[in-house]
Each structure stands twice: as structure tokens, then as C-alpha cells.
Image: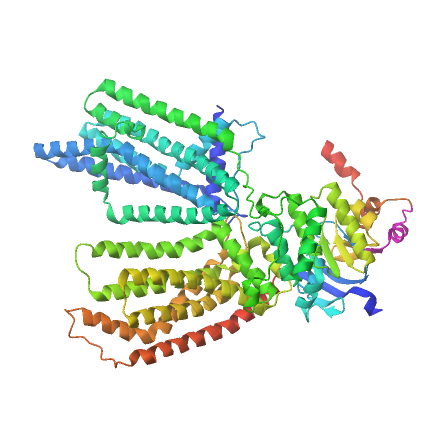
Amino acid sequence: MTNLLALKLTSVSKRYGDVTAVDYLDLDVKKGEILGLLGPNGSGKSTTLKMILGLVKPDSGSVNVLGINVEDDPVAVKRKVGYVPESPRVYEFLTGLEFLDFTGDVYGMQLEEKKKRIEEFLKALDLEGREGDMISSYSEGMKQKVVIISAIMHRPELLLLDEPLSGLDPKSARIVKDLLHEMASQGVTTIMSTHILEIAQAMCDRIAIMYDGRLSALGTMEELRQRARMPDSGLEDIFLKLTGTGDIKPVVEALMK
Amino acid sequence: MNWKNVLRLVSVDRKYSRVIRGTRFRRFRENRIVTYALYIGACLFGLLIGWLVANFYNGISDTTLKELFLQGATSLFTTLPTLALLYGLVFSQMGQMQRIGAKVSIQPLYWFPITWKEHTLASILANLIGWPLIITIFIGSSTSLASVPLGLAPLAVFTMLALLASLFLASVTTEVFKILQVRISGAVTKVAGRAAIWVRLLGSILFFIIFYLAYFSLYYSVSLPALIESIAGGQRILWFIPYVWLGIALSAFISGLMLETMIFFLASLAFIYFLFLAAARLNVRFGLYEAPSITISHGAYIPKAGLLGRVGFSSIEAAIIKKDFRAFTRRRELMYIFIMPIVFTIIPLISSMRGATGGSLPSAFYSFLFVYLTLLPGTLMTVALGSFIIGSEGGGVWYIYSSPISAKSLVKAKYFFATLFSFAITLVCFFIGVLLTSPSLQITTIGLTEAILLIFSLGMVSLTFGIRGADFREFPRPRMIRPLWSFINGLVCILLALTIISPIIPYGLKILFETMQASAAISIPLPESYLYAALPLSGIIALVVTYLFYRKTVENAEEFLLKAET
């Protein structure tokens, strides 16, 4: 069973001063699964992703990624993971090509493999022709594409994506979505935090809803509908109900006064 | 022209200037009393000086002396507009330079109902607030009060007008220069591609060196009376340059040539207005600055193993070294690290060379000059690079955190880069020193050996503190290291540098005393073989320092890689 798990969080918690970011979280994610991590701002999604990558040390509990305890060997974990942070600041003084070449070297890719992957991705995400320009002149969407390529190009076994599709044009967003599905079919696990519920509903095998640092719901769309007792509803209504933030009408009415 | 818009924009611009100079960005609270205290202080101090001058003048009983004093005061009044132009230019240019390193910049809000003329005027006025205005308030208040007993009140009023016009002229010139600079750098980067990087790097280094050289030359060697004298004598000869017309108008006013006064004064105002219109037009065309798209490479991508890979660096270490090299040649704010050691070396060098002119120098001077040139720039560079190199990652540090890099690899890559660059600087300075001073073999050996020892040991020391005190905040300007840790690093480096070179100090003193005829009585008896023992001893001290600090650096790096949460 453990061999089938890409990620196992056991009673993981993290506090920042008086604020509990993550509160005794238990979570198992299977290999090849796409898990959507949803939750309002400040619910602990980004902290969870950082703890999985070993960027934040949990106060308690353990994080096991692909059979490795993150605390024991964070470098080995990082080698197997691709990460897109919430608001990535890339090295703007490099060109897109130089940044991806740098990424390939950082992950120890072979020269031929690196060249092939970079060229494929640049072409697929419409960055061809601009790859030799310094990133400082790129639009936000283009920067996001570069970061996504850098997370995927070294063939990671686990992808941690924090709002990965923000700023992408429809074509690139579609390519990334299809790519994630394709990678999942080859056994790559993806944990994706997003506020765009349609994307989560369309892409994810399971959805985890976090609220106040806790896991308030976890399951497939059907399981979430049953839990919320909203059989015909979409993810937005379910999310609002399960996070207790559904009573929006009075807020809008107050604003319109 | 909507003056309320102009005033609002001026206030935003001034706040921006204060914020980028300060250390707090997110929680900036303006203390109005402190902000305006300098202006009030300048006014009060000016009034005090004016009162003292007036009393001094009233106390003179000798009419010839009184006449002479009056003539001197009148001459001073005529030079003030040109003087105001000079300090206006210097301070407004310095204000622009301060903004170069800032990561945040204020862009005109072009979608707001504000015209380009309003933007331009606000920028010009905002440039004047601060030291130009403080000095002008001081001059204005002192001359106004002193002019009454001197019977120069009408001249003082006219001088004040001319002063303000000169300041405006200086600022509008800076505004035009600023826009042209953006235009030129944009044009250069568009046409030059990869060469643009080098043009920008070398151009910036050259600009800073020239600016600092001019500034220190003025500061150290030109006295204010000499400057005033040369302005008073020179502005009539240079009548065809519009920038001195205000001064000429004043001197015509003193001579009672009213027509000439009117012509030059009105011509000055027309010139200022023309420049203002030019600045506004240039702003319309180039005012919205966009980061130039610098194309570094064209054609097919060919990945290379590279030299670093062949000499034993892992691919991740080589990648970080290459990335840092690019950062230090492409990031404008990091160019200061290159420039400062160069400037701090050149200034005392020029001062000592200037002091040396006119007489023959003892041979010891050339020996010390050689050692100074070989030791100082490289050592300063290694201390600066070592302490800044981790903090210079800035917001992109998440990439280092999330990369599969071990603490030892990180230390190895960063240390290699810092010391290699410093060593290159040392070699350049070493050859310059050899050419300038033709040192003996012993002095050459001492200089080069000690330089290498200092670079490699202090580089590690600075990296230790650079990791410990790294500051990744980039707003309003990249901090790179917290001030306390920078101070501690400086202090420790000075102490350790003295410790490392301590075995050589007796030899240096021996040479010094031998060449000083007057102190021939003092002599340090050292055996011929002293250097054979001193240099290895110095090397052992450097090795011990490097090793101890290496262990601490790795420890700090391990901690740093687990610190993403802060």
C-alpha cells in the first residue's frame, strides 16, 4: 500500500506565532493522482505545499514523499518534485532560455535530454522567438509559462502547483491541463492549489477542501456532493457550503446600499 | 495646467524619494516635523548669518573698508544664480542616481486625467525639494537680511528671483537628461543585443567613476572662494551659453544697465520655458518607461558542459556560478558592488598622487603604493561579494530553497564566484601596480601572496556573515544583508586581515624606517630569512581562518536552506 502512495501526511501541524496555519493534517495521495487543494485565503494550502517540499518544517507530524521522509533527506525529495509557487519571482536578468538551461543543470539533466525538452516546451507554450530575450521584458503570463516549464521539464514524480494557470492564455492553459492529465496517466502525481473551481472540478481526481488549517472535506466530486447533500450542485456551491462562507447575499446587498 | 494635480504629484514623488532612501517600505510613517525641520533650520541659520553680517558691516568705521566690503557683497550676489545652477544640477542628478538602484519606480498614471505637462512640471519641482531648496532658503534668508543695511535690498529681491529661476533651470535640465538617458539606453539595448549588457555595465561603471571623481575633486581641492571668483570672472566671457544669462542679468542690474538686464532676464525665462516644453514633449514620446527587451541570444540552442563542469564542479554548482556571473553583470543595483571598491581605491590613490606632485618621492612610497593597489581592491571586492552574494538572490531565493542543492554545494558555488572575481580584480590591479611602481621581487611576492591569502580567507568569513545576515527584501531597494551583520562582518574582516598580515608588518615597518632619514635612529633588525618564515606563517593563519569559517558557513547554509518559512 505504501508503495502506491506518493504522499503521506501524518498529523502535520504548523503554527506561526498565535496563528495555526495547518492543524494536525492527515492526507494520503496515490501515485498518478491529481489532487485539487482548495480553500479560502489563509486556510493553509500554501503552507501545506511548502511542508511537502521541505521548505517549511512542521511543528509536529511527519511528511513522507515518494517513500522519503522529508526531514531526513529534503534534497532527495526536491530532486523528485516540480514546484510552482504562488507568486514566483524568477531571475529576471536571465533570458527564458538561460533560466531553463539553469533549471536543467540544477536538476542534473543530460545535455541532449535538456535540449530536447526545452525546445519542445518552448514550442508548445508559444515562447519560441522570445526565448533569447531577458525575462524582465516578459509579460506575467510568459513568466508563468517559464516557471511551469521549469517545474515539469526534469520529469518530476510529484508536482506541487500553487495557482499554476494564473495569467496563462487559454491555449497554454489547455496545453498544461492536458499535459498534467497525460503525466498522471504515466504515474506522475499532482497536487494543485487553486481558487478557480471550474479547473479543479474539471481536472482533479479528488478534491481536498481546507478551512482554518484543517481538512474539512476530501473526496471525488460525487463524494463531496453527497457530503454536502447537494446532489446536482457544482463545486462552487459545495465549496461555499462546506467552508461555511456561503451566505453571500447579505454582503452584496449591503454593498449595493 | 491643473495646479492641484501638480502639487499632488509633487507630494507623491517626494514621498517616494524619502521611502527609497529609508529602510522601511511597508510601514513608512512620515514625521512632518522632522521633514520640515531642515527648511526651518536653514531659514533661521540664514537669518542669523545675515544678522551677523549686517552687524559686522555696521561696525566697520573705515569707509574704504566699507566700500570694499560692499563691492565684495555685490560680486557675490552676481555669482549666486550660477552657483545655484551648479548645486541644483549636482543634487538633482544625485537624486536621480539614488533611484537607479530602487526596485520600485513611479510611473506616470497615464490613464488618469493628468496631462504630460503636469507630470513634467511636478517631476521638475519635486527634484528641487530637499537640499537644493534648503541651500536656497539659507542663501535667500541671509542675503535678504544682510542686504538691508548694505543698501542692496532691490538687488537681493532680484537675486532671489534669479536663484529660483536657476534652480528651476537646473531641474528642468536634469529632467531632459533623464528622459534622454532612458531613450538612449533603450535605443542601445535594442540595437546592441548581447553587447548591450556590456555597454550598460561598463557605461555604468564609467559614469559612477567619473561622477565620484568629479565630486571628490570638487570636495577636496576646489575652495568655495576660488569657485565664486572663477564664476564671477567667467560668466561674461561665456555670454553665449544660456545657463549664465541669469548671472549676467544680475551684473547688468548692478551696473544700472536696465535694458541689458531685461534682455538677459527675459531671455533666461524664455530658455527655461523652451526647455520645459522640450521636456514635456520628450515625456510624451518616451515618458512611459518599459523595460527594454534585451535579446541575448538568437538561433539554435546548444547546451554545453562548460569549463566549470570539466574542472570538477557539479552541474548544479556550475549552474549557480554561471547564474551569479550573469546577475552581477546584468543587474544594475549589483553594479555598485563592482564600483565601490574601484572608487574607494582610485580616490585615495589620486589624492596621494596629487600630493606627490612637485617633489621626488622616497622609494618606500612606491612600494606601499604597489602593496596598496594589490591588496585593497581585491580584498574589498571579496568582502563585498561574500557578504552580498546570498542576499542578492532577492525574491528569486525560492528557487534556491526548492532546488535539490546541498549546503556544501551552495557554499562551494558562492565562495568560488566571490573569490574568483576578486582574484581577477587583484590580478588587474597587480599588473597596473607593477607597471606604475616597478616593485622589487620581494615586494611583488609579499603583495601578491598576501592578496591571495586575504581574498580566500576573508571571502569565506564574509560568506559566513552574508548567509547569517542575508536580507532578501527587494523593496524599495535590494538590501542583501542586514546592517548589523554587515557591520559585524566589516569589523571581523578588519581584525582578521590585520591578524593575517601581522607577520609581514615588521618587515613593512623596517622598510619604512629605513627610508625615513629623520627617524634613522629607529631600526628594526630582521634577519635576511625573515620573509621565508613570515609568509608561510601568514599563510597558516589564513588557512586556519578559512577552515574555521568554512565549517561555520556550511552550518549557516544548512540552516538557511530550511528557513523558507521566514
Q: Position of residue A246 (x, y in %)?
A: 80, 44
Q: Residue at x 52, y 26 (%)?
A: B115
**Residue lying farthest to the top in this orientation:** B259
**Residue placed most toward the observer, A86 or A234:** A86
**Residue placed most toward the observer, B36 or A141:** A141
Q: Residue at x 52, y 54 (%)?
A: B327
**Residue placed most toward the observer, A170 or A207:** A170
Which quadrant, please, contains the C terminus of chain B?
Answer: bottom right
- In the image: residue B99, left or right of residue B169: right
Counting the numbered discs, the total is 0
Examine the rendered structure and indicate whether residue A178 appears above or below residue A112: above
Q: Position of residue B507 (x, y in %)?
A: 27, 74
Q: Position of residue B42 (x, y in %)?
A: 32, 40
Quarter-wise, where is residue B384 in the image?
Answer: bottom left
Q: Position of residue B123 (x, y in %)?
A: 45, 34
Q: Is residue B249 visible?
A: yes
Q: Which residues are magenta?
A: A216-231
Examine the rendered structure and indicate whether residue B172 appears above or below residue B225: above
Answer whether residue B355 is magenta in the image: no
Q: Is residue B487 visible?
A: no
Q: Residue at x 43, y 47 (%)?
A: B204
